[in-house]
Amino acid sequence: MTSGVGHAFKPWFGEAQAVLRPLDPDNARAEIADLAGRARAAGHEALAATLSDAEDPNAAFIAAALDLSPFLRDTIRRDPAMLQRLAQEGVEARLDALLSAIRAAGSAEGQSETGLMRDLRLLKAEAHALIALDDLAHGGNARATVGRLSALADAAIGSAIRFLLLEAAGRGKLDLPDAADPEKGSGWVILGMGKLGACELNFSSDIDLVVFFDPEAPAVGDPWDAADTFVRMTRRLVRILQDRTEHGYVFRTDLRLRPDPGSTALAIPVEAALIYYEGRGQNWERAAMIKARPVAGDIRAAEGFLKELQPYVWRKYMDYAAIADVHSIKRQIHAHRGHDAIAVHGHNVKLGRGGIREIEFFVQTQQLIAGGRFPELRGRQTIAMLYMLADRKWIEPETASELEEQYWFLRSVEHAIQIVADEQTHILPEDDEGIRRIALMLGFAGEEAFAERFRAALKTVEGHYAALFETAPQLSGDMGNLVFTGEDDDPGTLETLSQLGFERPSDMARVIRTWHFGRYRATQSAEARERLTELTPALLKTFGATRRADEALLRFDEFLAGLPSGIQLFSLLQTNPPLLGLLATIMGAAPRLAAIITRRPHVFDGLLDPALISDLPTRAYLADRLETFLAGATLHEEVLDRLRIFAAEQKFLIGIRLLTGAIDARRAGKAFSDLADLTISAALDAVQDEFALRHGRVPGGRVAILGMGKLGSRELTAGSDVDLILLYDHDPDAMESDGEKGLAPSQYHIRLTQRLIAAVSAPTAEGVLYELDLRLRPSGNKGPVATHVESFAKYQRTEAWVWEHMALTRGRMIAGDAGLCSEMTAVMADLLDEAGADGAKIAKEARKMRKLIEEEKPPRDAWDLKLVPGGLIDLEFIAQVARLTGRLDLPEDGPVPTATVNVLSILSPDFADPAVRDDLVEAAQLYMDLTQMLRLCLTGPFERDDAPPGLVDLLLRSTDLPDFSVLEAHVKETAGRVRKYFEALLRAADR
C-alpha cells in the first residue's frame, strides 16, 4: 500500500522516526479525520488520502502530535499544505527553503512593513511547526532543535534589519555603502545575548538583543541625527518581530540587557557603551557578554566592539572575587539541600534543583575564572565549553560526559513543555495527565518511567553543581581567632568578625558571649554550650555570607532566646549544613519568617520532613494533613488551637517552598488559599457544633461562606487577611432554632457569625488563625454580619454599586453546606451576567474609581505594586470589567476563573488583541512573583535603598533577571505599558 504522498510509507522525518503515542486515542482519531477533511477541502487529495490511511505510520504520528500539542493542532489546521510540502521535500530541505525565504523577505522588491510582518509570521509558523514535529519524531531532539531555532531567529532578525536599513536609505536617513548588502558599513550593531547568542534557543524562547550604533560609520551622514534614526529603527525592529497580528508573532524581543536599561535609549552609541562597561559595568554584565554574538546588522563593527570589550569580560588574572557576585541569584535558589526527594510535578526544569541553569552556571563560572588566561575557554556554547574544561583538566572527562547527557535530556523536556501550547514556561505540569503528556511526547512508556529518568538527571546535575559551588561550611578551620570567653573583646576575634562581614564586631561578640555564658534556656546545659561552641564558626561564616551579617545574627539571637532547649537544634545544624544555610537565609533576607520562628520555634520542626520539597502543598495534601492533626481533639477550644498551630506551621512551610524555589508564586497563592479554605471550613464546622449545643439548629438551616478578594481569586499571600461573606438559608416557615435557648433565624445566624469571627480572629495563646474582613457584605459595616441568600441576591440586583459587582467577580464559595455553595455559585453567575448589561457605565465607573483611589491613596513609590499607576489595581480592574461585560473567551466546561492572571489570559479578541492580552498576563505574573516574595519576607513595605541583599537575590531569582537595575527598569516599563492599556481598554469599553 502506498501513502499517497511520496513513496510507500516513507517516514517524513527519516528512518529513525519514533512511534508517537497519543494521550487520548479517540481524540487523536477525531483530529486526524478533521485534518484530512480540511486537506481535501483545500484540494490536497493526496495528503488527505495519506492522513485517512489508518495503516500509514505518518498519519498515526501526526494524529498523536495533534492530540498531544494544541499548538501543533492549531498551526497545522491553518495550513494543512505544510504537510504536503514536508512529504515532498523532506524536513531538512523544507527548513532550508523556509530560512532562505525568510532571509529574502526583507529585501524583496516593493516590500512594505505590513507585508514583511505577514511574510515573516507565516514562514516562521511553518518552520516552528516542522521543528516541533521533528523534535517529537526523535523522542526529543534538543541538540538539533536549539540550532534550528537559533538559525530561524537569526534569519528573521536579519531580514527585518535589511528591510529597515533599505527603507532608511530610501528616505535619505542613511547612505548605505552597498545597497546589495545593506548591513555592511551601516554601523548598526545587533548582538544576540543569552541563548540566542549561544545558538541554544528553546522552543518558545524570547530573544535577548542589545543594540548599539556607530555614529561615525560610513552609512551615517549626520552623526547628530544618528541617535534618533537608530532608536526609531530599533523600535520598529521590535514591533516587526514581536507584535501579534492575525498571523501570530515572530519572536518576543527583549532589550533589557542593554546598559542601564532604566535610563538609556533602545540603541546606544558604541563609544558610550564601552565607557559604561569599562567604568560601571557589573559582574552579571560580564557574565552576559560571554554569550554575546553578532546576529545581524554591521557584523564587522559588532566584532570590533566585542574585541574592544574583551579586557572587560576576560580579566587577565584569575578572577575568583567576581564569582560570588555573578552567582548571587543562584546562591538563593537552593538554600535548602537537606531533602533528597525532588518533586517532578510542578518542577522548574530551568531554575529548579538540578536544572538547566545549574549546568550553564557550572560552565560559565569557570569560564569567568579562567577565560582571561585561557582564550580557548571563551566560547559561547555550554556543551562545547564543558568539554574544553575537561580538556584543560578543570573537570573530569566523566563529569563533562554526564552533564552533557543530562543537559540535552533536560533541554528536550523543556522543549516538550513548550511545544504543548507554545508558551514560554519551564515548569512541568502539576497533574498526572500533564506529566503523562510530556512523557509520551518524549517517547516514554508512561509517567513513572519519565519521572524516574527525570529525577536521576536532576540528582546527577545537582551532585556536580554542589561539588563545585556548595561545599559544606567547615565547622572549624582557618578563619582566624574566635574567642568568646571572659568579659573583654579579643582583638583577633573582632578582626575575624569584621573580615566575615560583621559591621559591629564588638556588639556581635557581646551577643555571642551571652550564649556561651548560658543566659538562655537553650544554652544552660554544658553539653548545649559545647555543641554551640563547635557550631559557632560555621554559624558566623554562614551569617557573614548573607551580606547583612549583623541583622542575621541578632535575629538568630532572638530565636535562640525563645528556644526551650538547644542541644537537638545545634546537633542538627552541625550535621546538616544546608539547613544552616536556610536558617541564615531566613535570618538575613526574610525578617517576617525570622519573626515567625522566633515566636513559634516549633514551626522549624516541619523543615525536618524529608518529603517537604517533593510533596507539593496541594489541597488534597493539606486536607489529609489537617484531618490527621485534628484527630483526637474533642474540646472546642482545643480544635481552635490546633487549627492555629496547623495553619501557622503550614503557612511557614509553604513559604519555605517558595523561598527555596520548590514552588512558584502562582502555586504559593493557591496553597495559601487552599489552607485558608480548609481551616476556615473546619472552624465553621466546630463553631456550628458548639453553637448548636445550646441554641440547636434552625429547621432547614444551611450556612455557606463566600470568599472574596484574594481568597476568592486564590491569590492569598503569606501576610494576607481574608475577606468573607457569610450566607445562610432556612425553611420559609422556620420561626426559631430548636435548641434549649431558641433564636429567630436572623438572630441565630448573626450570633453564629460573631462566634465564627471570634473563633478565627480572636488572639489565643496560639495567636490568630486569620484576620477577617467582612466589609464586602451587603451594605458594608452598616449591614448585618450574616446575610440571607435572598437578601444577598436582591441587594446585588437592586442596590449594589458597580464596584461591588466588580468585587463579586472574584467571589468563590469556600466552605459550608455543599448544596448551598453550588446554588450560590450559579446565582452569582446569573447576577454577574445581569449586572454587566451596561458595559459603558461599568467601564466609566471603573475609571472614576481608579482615579479616586489614586487621589486618596497615592502610591508610596514605584515599588508600591498595588497602588502604582499601571500596577495590580489596574490589572484587577481590567479583568473585572471584562468579566462583568462578558468580554472573555470562557471555557466550555468548568468554573469561570476568578484569579486575575487567569481572567486576563482569556480576554476576548474584541476586547484586547492577543499582543495586549499577553502583555497583561506577563505583567500580572511579574507582580505576583514579586508580591508573593515580598509579603513572605517582609512585614512592612519594601524599601529599595535598605533592602537586604539576600531578599534582592530572591526577587531576581523569582523573576529570572540578572540585576536589580534591570528589574527596576522592567517594573517601571511594565507599569507604564499596563497604564496605557488600562486607559485604552476602558475608554474603548466606555463608548
Image (cartoon, rainbow, N blue to C red):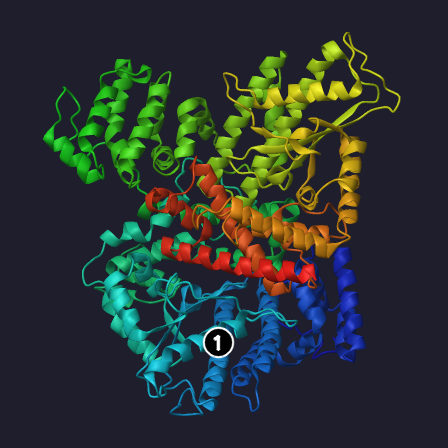
Q: Position of residue 94 (x, y in %)?
A: 59, 79
At horizontal 68% and vertical 59% (from top left) the residue drawn is 990
Relative side of 371 to 642, left or right = left
- Secondary structure at badge 1 equals helix
Where is residue 641 shown, x and y percent of the image? 56, 18
Asked if one can make out residue 419 in the rendered structure from this viewpoint, the answer is no
Q: Is residue 356 left or right of residue 669?
A: left
Outermost residue toward the left? 491
Residue 739: tell me if it is visible: yes
User: Compared with residue 837, is residue 732 higher up or lower down, i.e. above or below?
Assistant: above
Rendering quarter of residue 954? top left
- Residue 912 drawn at (x, y percent): 65, 62
Identify which residue is drawn at 61% across, 67% down: 133
**Residue at horizontal 43 percent and vertical 64 percent from the top:** 195
Q: Depth check: 673 or 325 in front?
A: 673
Judge whether 547 appears above or below 375 on screen.
Answer: above
- Residue to which mark 1 is pinned: 157
Q: Position of residue 715 (x, y in %)?
A: 58, 41
